[in-house]
Image (cartoon, helix red, strand yellow):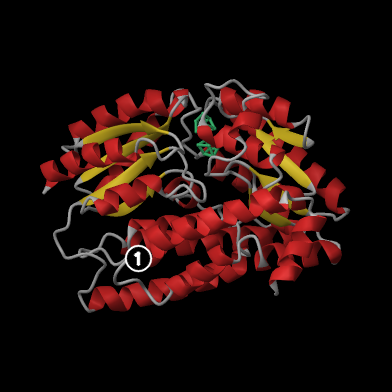
Amino acid sequence: MTDSAHREMWEKLNLDLEAHDGLLAVLGQFYGDIYLSQDNRLKGAEYLDFVLSEVHGLRIKEIQDARDAGRKVIGSFCVFVPEEITLAADAVHVGLCAGAEAGTDLAEQMVPRNTCALIKSFIGFKLARLCPFIESSDMIVGETTCDGKKKAYEAFNEIAPTYVMEVPQTKTQAARELWKSEVLRYLAEVEKLTGKTITAEKLKEGIRIANGKRRALQRLTALRAADPAPISGRDALLINQISFYDDPVRFTAKINELCDELESRIADGKGVAPAGTPRLMLSGCPMAVPNWKLPYVVEGAGAVIVGEESCIGTRNSRDLVDESGETLEEMIDAITDRYMKIDCACFTPNDERLDNVTALAKDVKADGVIHYSLLFCQPYSHEALKVDKALQAEGVPMLSIETDYSMEDVEQLKTRVEAFVETLA
Ligand code: SF4
Ligand code: SF4
């Protein structure tokens, strides 16, 4: 695709071309510094580089072609929106969370300043006309998770009509019933949007595709337990980020190929850093593209990241939908149950997250954990205290970090992370 064809497409999507050029230039520079400068990268990383370089180009072209062929595009901000149902209606499911400071001044006219960077970012991207995924979405789906998002969707709805799913805040039987009714309401809405009936056969296929993606990510997580670590945390995070944008079938095939390469690397005793390099796990808020700040700081401090307990990480891939259901009702129950296992900090109580964090730290053989909360994120900041206690009980040290998307605190973060890594060496 030529540069002029790209520009024509972005113009049709009503992007602000000048501001968008600026964004791509910064992104390219960032990617070069943080990703292309790494040593011992996998051959499979070519796929990651290609997807990222074309994330606003060829992938958007594919999505436009799908729309021209009559398919609908559904954008979501949270792992609670059941992708299986979107796929069963032959629609395209994309993640819209944004990980860069853009349009912040505009966003702060719609939401309070003390709102987390992730929320300000997706509102800013829309207001500054920078995101071709938002502009390509036929339906945008929000959810009642944290208070910040709940209120932000009311504001966002004024600039982009937003369908909101009610996510319960507890894990009681009544909460499960509420969630099941929301899954059914979403299914009806997707049928209305696409004009397609979701049959048992189509839903089974949707479940199979979404589970395939999760299985590939589970395989990746398991391989990262090796010492030396076979892949950098930066590349593993990028894989998780790309899982929200790329075609799910292609993504699954490519990540399985990359895992084959990881297996040979492990068999040869090779890795991205020498055996014995301090191993850290990240836990907490999601890191959306291109939020690579903390992984860059951590791996620059001489540690290697071996796991991400987050929605752009194992919280999104840990649980599969039971594939044994044959009827629509059985499959809806299986989807309901799978999503009710998500241990987002918006739930109360949310003790299963503590078990999941400690179990993952053990599985990936982490020497320490960095808990990451975005500034003004109440749910994850609160849980940082509980996670610390749970890890302490298991003898795993934790460093708690609160930050945002700006680069102003990088030097300060480096100092804190380096000091933490030294205690682990
Ligand atoms: S952290 Fe909670 S609100 Fe955010 S994407 Fe995950 S489940 Fe959704
Ligand atoms: S990071 Fe925290 S405050 Fe921001 S959307 Fe997620 S749960 Fe809400």
Q: In this view of the protein, which residue sits in the foreground, 144 or 342?
A: 144
The residue under the point 30% across, 54% down is 306
Image point (32%, 61%), residue name: 232
Residue 359 quadrant: top left
Q: Is residue 149 left or right of residue 316?
A: right
The quadrant of the rendering that contains the N terminus is: bottom right
Of 263 and 119, which appears nearest the observer? 119
SS at mark 1? loop
- For the question of whether residue 37 can be seen, the reply is yes
- Classify residue 270 by image quadrant: bottom left
Q: Where is residue 137 shown, x and y percent of the image?
A: 75, 50
Q: Residue furthest right?
A: 195
Left or right: residue 154 versus residue 268 is: right
Residue 123 locus on image (x, y percent): 65, 35
Q: Position of residue 245 (x, y in %)?
A: 60, 57
Mark 1: amino acid:
Ser
Q: Is residue 186 above or below residue 400?
A: below
Is 347 rendered above or below residue 10? above
Residue 259, percent across and down?
40, 71
**Foreground pick, 369 / 316:** 369
Q: Residue at x 49, y 67 (%)?
A: 48
The crowd level at tag 1 (other Cα within 10 Å; few <14, some 14-19, many 20+) is few
Q: Which residue is mark 1?
A: 37
Q: Residue at x 76, y 31 (%)?
A: 157
